[in-house]
Image: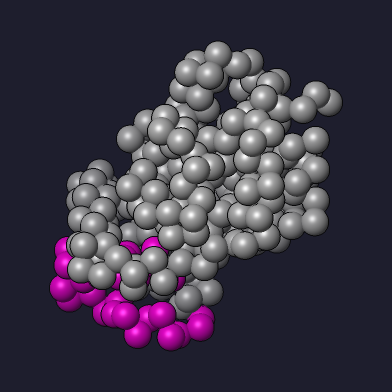
């Protein structure tokens, strides 16, 4: 296989463990929209509910999905498969999803404005992955394909002194579209590359399946926001599951 001209990377669950920040922001948003919610910040100290939230993370995709997960846990109706999850999400309705999305990003911006350092400290960077990127960052183009907002990604990259890895125009954020295919299509178009010339790493199997349909070789970040369920699914579809030992070879060689 030829070395790639470009490596596209998902952000959360690939470069950084953002579970704490996401959960804290999601809880504040839920309480703002529905003050009677029994969910409170003490939720984060309850290992069972925390595990339930983490198990639901791979089934969602965007900010509003964290709201879906919280409501499922509140109601004790925890979906186990992607299909059950999609049904539960649909039943909550578009208004719920839209208002949660808006409130989530308002809440996050407020936290950043109030105390940026405290907000950054909620994130745990995957140092091994960042070291690989700093080493390889000049070998080929690196691009982010993320459902996060660019400003948040930039705050975090700068706090790790890695803003240089993704120059202007190299962050494809939530505004590009709902589906990862929109990000990947825009990247192929803007960099004038064919699908076989790029590689893509994500911690969600469904994004990698979308990439595979487009002819793009994908790698599952096995350290990310996924579980054994996703590792099995990825392997069933011929998608390699990387760890910090194997990821450099899988992406760059
Ligand atoms: Mg991710």
Is residue 75 found left or right of 5 in the rendered image? left
Q: What secondary structure is the stretch in magenta mostly built from? A: helix
Pick the front one: 138 or 196: 138
Quick check: is 31 in the magenta stretch?
Answer: yes
Would residue 18 be visible to someone looking at this image? yes
Quick check: is 32 in the magenta stretch?
Answer: yes
Q: Residue at x 61, y 22 (%)?
A: 214
Is residue 94 found left or right of 82 in the rendered image? left
Give the number of callouts. 0
Residue 115 screen position, x and y as percent = 26, 70
Is residue 90 found left or right of 54 in the rendered image? left
The N terminus lies in which quarter of the figure?
A: top right
Q: Residue at x 53, y 74 (%)?
A: 51
Residue 166 screen position, x and y as percent = 49, 39
The C terminus lies in which quarter of the figure?
A: top right
Pick the front one: 226 or 123: 123
Question: Is 217 above or below relative to 75?
Answer: above
Would residue 57 be visible to someone looking at this image? no
Indicate how the structure is coloured in the image. Answer: one colour
Residue 109 screen position, x and y as percent = 24, 57
Single out the residue that lies furthest toward the right: 1
Q: Residue at x 30, y 66 (%)?
A: 116
Question: Is 192 above or below relative to 12?
Answer: above
Question: Is 127 above or below relative to 9?
Answer: below
Please state the extent of the stretch shown in magenta in the rendering.
20-48
Residue 74 screen position, x and y as percent = 34, 73
Is residue 174 found left or right of 192 in the rendered image? left
Q: Residue at x 64, y 47 (%)?
A: 133
């Amino acid at each position: 296989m030829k070395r790639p001209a470009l490596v596209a990377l998902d952000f959360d669950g690939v470069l950084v463990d953002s579970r704490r920040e996401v959960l804290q922001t999601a809880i504040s948003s839920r309480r703002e929209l529905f003050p009677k919610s029994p969910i409170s910040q003490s939720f984060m100290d309850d290992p069972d509910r925390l595990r339930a939230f983490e198990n639901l993370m791979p089934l969602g995709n965007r900010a509003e999905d964290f709201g879906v997960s919280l409501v499922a846990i509140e109601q004790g109706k925890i979906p186990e498969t992607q299909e059950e999850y999609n049904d539960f999400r649909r039943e909550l309705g578009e208004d719920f999803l839209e208002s949660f999305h808006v409130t989530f990003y308002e809440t996050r911006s407020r936290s950043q404005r109030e105390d940026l350092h405290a907000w950054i400290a909620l994130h745990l960077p995957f140092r091994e992955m960042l070291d690989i990127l700093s080493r390889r960052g000049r070998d080929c183009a690196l691009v982010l394909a993320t459902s996060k907002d660019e400003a948040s990604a930039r705050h975090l990259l700068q706090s790790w002194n890695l803003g240089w890895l993704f120059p202007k125009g190299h962050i494809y954020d939530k505004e590009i579209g709902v589906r990862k295919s929109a990000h990947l299509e825009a990247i192929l178009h803007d960099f004038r590359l064919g699908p076989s010339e790029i590689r893509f790493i994500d911690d969600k199997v469904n994004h990698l399946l979308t990439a595979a349909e487009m002819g793009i070789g994908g790698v599952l970040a096995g350290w990310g926001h996924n579980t054994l369920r996703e590792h099995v699914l990825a392997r069933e579809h011929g998608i390699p599951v990387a760890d910090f030992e194997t990821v450099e070879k899988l992406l760059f060689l």
